[in-house]
């Protein structure tokens, strides 16, 4: 059972090269699994879930496994006679070693005893071969002198991570397990008096509506320029970090130093203009020093690389959050993200933005963290009566509305005369319009905005449903 020629098949050139390099494999374990499948219908069902055709190193074993899978799908009984007949009908019988080899497999009755262990060996060796294959592909990518090395890094990481993807996918669980988790979460929320069960926004009414920002959620914050979406995002970052969350902040608009200035002024309640011009009183210096000490204890990571792509953001975020228990990612803002290198969208920016939005949603799911994505709104809302933003105003929206779990739109009156109108927010008030909430209610929450220190405060604890 050790020689390929015994079964009448000729390995491909790639298999020859693999054999010379000693690719991990266990032919005996493969044979034991196939024998167990021939002896038990229950084993067939479990093996077809646990294993894939490419897990079998020997081509003849792969052919037999594929044949039994096809027979199972067609409700054909799986035994030695039926398998021989099926292999003969597809002209593969001689390729796998003929009737003699099928009967030999059938005669190995002891294979049933430890077939799961043998299946684990087959799966383990297949994974090791995949790792070797991935490293070879990564080496080839590196030697091809790619245009965008960032894309190569992301592809290399994806290749290695995909090796374990099957293990994740096969880790299915019964509905009862998830119901137990849901029940436990409800108990915890009840014991906490209905408090948030995710990353807090820091605003009581908003937290009650959202129950915190949950893992895997894509949260979109939309606003016209100068309304305060970056300031709002920085307030969310501070509030989440103060609650023990790691915050990864990707700023494509402002530098890291500008973000630090805003953090300091918001925490110290110091006028931003005075901070920048040095007109700071002794009392304010004391507040600034205290704020810097407090902020220094927070786990906030800032990346201000301009012209980045979703690919690079995903790769960096994965490193940022390595070994972090609780985290939030914030991106400021979507329209400044560059499309993937080498892809041609024929000038269709909406398609570009839609693909980037979808990539960020996938990132949220992969990393298991909420991703807060800032987005501009179209100018067309300025000509609308009332100027109240709505989801369709998201610039180059494409699939943003579909991808997002939560959409918050910021609205603010630009002048006192505008604020006097009944259909506009009061002057100095930023209205957070919760336009979409996949897991809860929607409504408005009014916040007081202090432009000098870029700080938001809630002024009404009751949302308008």
Image: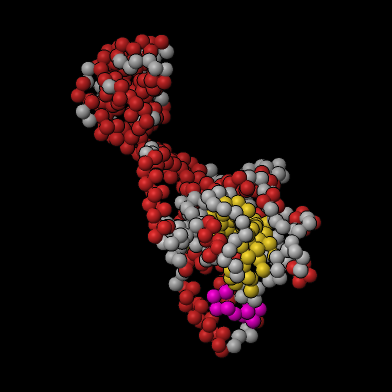
In the displayed structure, does residue 252 sit left or right of residue 118?
right
Q: Is residue 415 placed above or below 383 in the rendered structure?
A: below
Q: Position of residue 199 (x, y in %)?
A: 48, 60
Q: Is residue 147 placed above or below 206 in the rendered structure?
A: above
**Residue 106 image-quadrant placement:** top left
Q: Is residue 316 placed above or below 49 in the rendered structure?
A: below
Tell me, yes or no, if residue 269 can be seen here.
yes
Q: Position of residue 195 (x, y in %)?
A: 46, 61
Q: Is residue 337 magenta?
A: no
Magenta highlight range:
266-276
Tell me, yes or no, if residue 148 can be seen here.
no
Residues 101 and 266: in front is: 266
> Dividing the image into 4 quarters, which one contains the C terminus?
bottom right
In the displayed structure, does residue 234 sit left or right of residue 166?
right
**Residue 255 image-quadrant placement:** bottom right
Residues 380 and 458: in front is: 458
Most frequent secondary structure within the magenta stretch: helix
């Amino acid at each position: 059972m050790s020689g390929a020629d015994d079964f009448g098949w000729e390995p491909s050139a790639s298999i020859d090269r693999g054999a010379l390099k000693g690719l991990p494999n266990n032919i005996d374990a493969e044979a034991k699994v196939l024998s167990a499948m021939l002896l038990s219908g229950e084993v067939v069902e479990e093996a077809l879930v646990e294993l894939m055709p490419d897990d079998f190193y020997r081509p003849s074993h792969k052919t037999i496994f594929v044949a039994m899978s096809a027979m199972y799908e067609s409700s054909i009984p799986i035994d030695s006679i039926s398998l021989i007949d099926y292999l003969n009908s597809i002209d593969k019988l001689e390729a796998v070693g003929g009737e003699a080899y099928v009967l030999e497999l059938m005669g190995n009755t002891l294979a049933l005893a430890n077939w799961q262990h043998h299946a684990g060996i087959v799966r383990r060796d297949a994974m090791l071969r995949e790792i070797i294959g991935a490293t070879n592909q990564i080496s080839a990518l590196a030697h091809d002198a790619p245009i965008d090395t960032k894309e190569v890094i992301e592809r290399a990481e994806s290749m290695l991570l995909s090796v374990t993807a099957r293990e994740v996918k096969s880790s299915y669980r019964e509905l009862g397990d998830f119901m137990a988790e849901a029940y436990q979460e409800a108990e915890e929320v009840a014991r906490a008096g209905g408090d948030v069960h995710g990353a807090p926004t820091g605003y009581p009414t908003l937290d009650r509506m959202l129950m915190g920002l949950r893992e895997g959620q894509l949260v979109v914050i939309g606003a016209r320029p100068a309304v305060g979406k970056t300031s709002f995002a920085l307030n969310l970052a501070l509030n989440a970090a103060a609650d023990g969350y790691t915050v990864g902040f990707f700023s494509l608009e402002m530098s890291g130093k500008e973000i630090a200035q805003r953090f300091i002024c918001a925490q110290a309640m110091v006028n931003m203009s005075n901070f920048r011009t040095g007109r700071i009183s002794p009392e304010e210096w004391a507040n600034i020093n205290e704020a810097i000490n407090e902020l220094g204890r927070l786990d906030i990571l800032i990346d201000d690389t301009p012209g980045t792509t979703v690919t690079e953001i995903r790769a960096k975020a994965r490193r940022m959050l390595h070994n972090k228990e609780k985290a939030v990612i914030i991106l400021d803002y979507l329209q400044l993200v560059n499309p993937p290198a080498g892809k041609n969208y024929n000038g269709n920016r909406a398609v570009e933005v839609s693909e980037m939005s979808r990539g960020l949603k996938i990132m949220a799911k992969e990393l298991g963290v909420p991703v807060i994505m800032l987005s501009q709104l179209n100018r067309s809302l300025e000509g609308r009566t009332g100027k109240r933003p709505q989801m369709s105003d998201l610039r180059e929206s494409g699939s943003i509305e579909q991808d997002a779990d939560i959409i918050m739109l910021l609205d603010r009156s630009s002048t006192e005369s505008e604020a006097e109108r009944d259909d506009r927010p009061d002057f100095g008030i930023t209205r957070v319009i919760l336009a979409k909430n996949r897991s809860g209610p929607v409504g408005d929450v009014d916040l007081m905005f202090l432009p000098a220190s870029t700080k938001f405060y809630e002024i009404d604890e009751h949302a308008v449903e």
